Amino acid sequence: HDMDLSSFRDPKLARELIDRIHRLVGNRRINLMEVCGTHTVSIGRYGFRSIMPEGLRLLSGPGCPVCVTANRDIDHAIALARTEGIMVATFGDMMRVPGSTSSLAAEKSAGRDVRIVYSPLDALELATELPDRNVIFMGVGFETTTPAIAACVLEAASRGIENFSVFCVHKTTPPALRAIANDPETTIDGFILPGHVCTITGLAPFQFIAREFNIPGVVTGFEPVDILTGIDRLVEMIISGTPAVENAYPRSVRDAGNPVARSIAEKVFEPCSATWRGLGEIAHSGLCIREDYARYDARRRFAVEVEPTREPHGCRCGDVLRGVIAPTQCPLFGRACTPEHPVGPCMVSSEGSCAAYFRYR
Ligand code: SF4
């Protein structure tokens, strides 16, 4: 799209929306959650948390894929990287996340074959260039990234590339929102729904938050006016008691999403149970590789022993991801835990809540 974004950055429009939100909220206490890590970063960059009305809190959710990856899965990737003949390829953020006793970056320094790639296709190319290595792509991410990984598996199958596989820790967003809506420790009055994820999923999988939980949700973009419009609509629906799931990002998101991308993903993946940092195990919240493509599934192909799981001492990342505490409420925030020396994944990833709060504090 060749679209003029200036109106979504218009300071005058932004000011008007901020004033309106202040008038609407008054003395009320309202908790909104931004589900997506990119929203967390945008909200931090524009300083929205500090200019909202006193009673309106913007809590960060489970939308950073690296952050919600369970320690067990990181340890599993490390065990794979320690295996003779295997190369593990993954995104840069994933490398630095501490597992129970190591990280992929530490394994790389220790001489294991671990590489940073920018797309799964890079990993597939490595597999074709190095036929005597087993190249494993560690696939993390939500609905936005899965179609590309699926396409890559299909490509490997059609080209008959046998030394490529995926260690799949993909997750889907709606079951996590259900877990948060059911969580007695946190009260969310409205969800800022993930703009990128919804370009693929459309609105249908999120309708349950309004129907079953009476919580409104608005799909928003990432520019200042987008986010403020979303907040404004949520506040309106909360106050009037008319919860619905709405699309305030129609320039990118169609209500029906992208059925072509979904069908590619569905060819390769099927829902399975997954463990999330902070949220625990959630049924049908993960994606596993279907039986038909089992030879591209690193979990099935390589049996490795995974070390006992140990969570980073004192890290409250799990509570941050559920919206129970803000990053600044973690005793280690900015002291023992900084982007230079991260204790938990929420400080490692550029989309992590702790890193975003630290950068824009
Ligand atoms: Fe974990 Fe660091 Fe965030 Fe605290 S500040 S929750 S230790 S990542």
Image (spheres, helix red, strand yellow):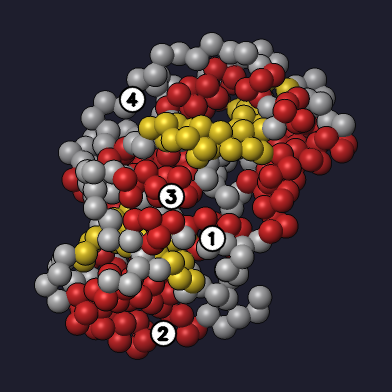
Q: Residue at x 53, y 63 (%)?
A: 203
234 with respect to 3 (left or right): left
- Mark 3 crowd level (few <14, some 14–19, many ≥20, 10 Å Cα): many
Q: Amino acid at mark 2?
A: Asp
Q: Which comes before the other along the chain, label 4 or label 3?
A: 3
Q: Is residue 31 above or below residue 324?
A: below
The residue identified by callout 1 is 204
Write down the quadrant of residue 340 in the picture.
top left
Query: Which of the two discs, 1 and 3, labels the residue nearer the N terminus?
Result: 3
Q: CA distance from mark 1 to mark 4?
A: 35 Å
Describe the element under mark 2 as helix, strand or loop: loop
Residue at image point 34% right, 56% down: 213
Judge by depth and name the residue closer to the eye, 207 or 29.
Answer: 207
- Tell me if residue 293 comes above or below residue 230 in the rendering: above
Q: CA distance from mark 1 to mark 3?
A: 19 Å
Task: Kindly report which numbered mark, 4 or 2, lies closer to the viewer in this rendering.
Answer: 4
Identified by mark 3, the residue type is Gly
Instruction: State the SS at label 1.
Output: helix
Element marked by disc 4: loop
| Label 1 CA crowd tier, 10 Å (few <14, some 14–19, many 20+) | few
Which residue is disc 2 drawn over? Answer: 10
Nearer to us in this view, 213 or 69: 213
**Residue on which the image places disc 3:** 63
The disc label shown at residue 85, or none: none
CB under 8 Å between callouts 3 and 2?
no
Identify the amino acid type marked 4.
Answer: Glu
Q: Which residue is mark 4?
A: 311
Q: Is mark 2 within 8 Å of ligand 1?
A: no
- Disc 4 to disc 3, C-alpha distance: 20 Å
Of mark 1 and mark 4, the one earlier in the sequence is 1
Q: Earlier in the sequence, mark 3 or mark 2?
A: 2
The answer to whether the residues at label 1 and label 4 have Cβ atoms under 8 Å apart is no
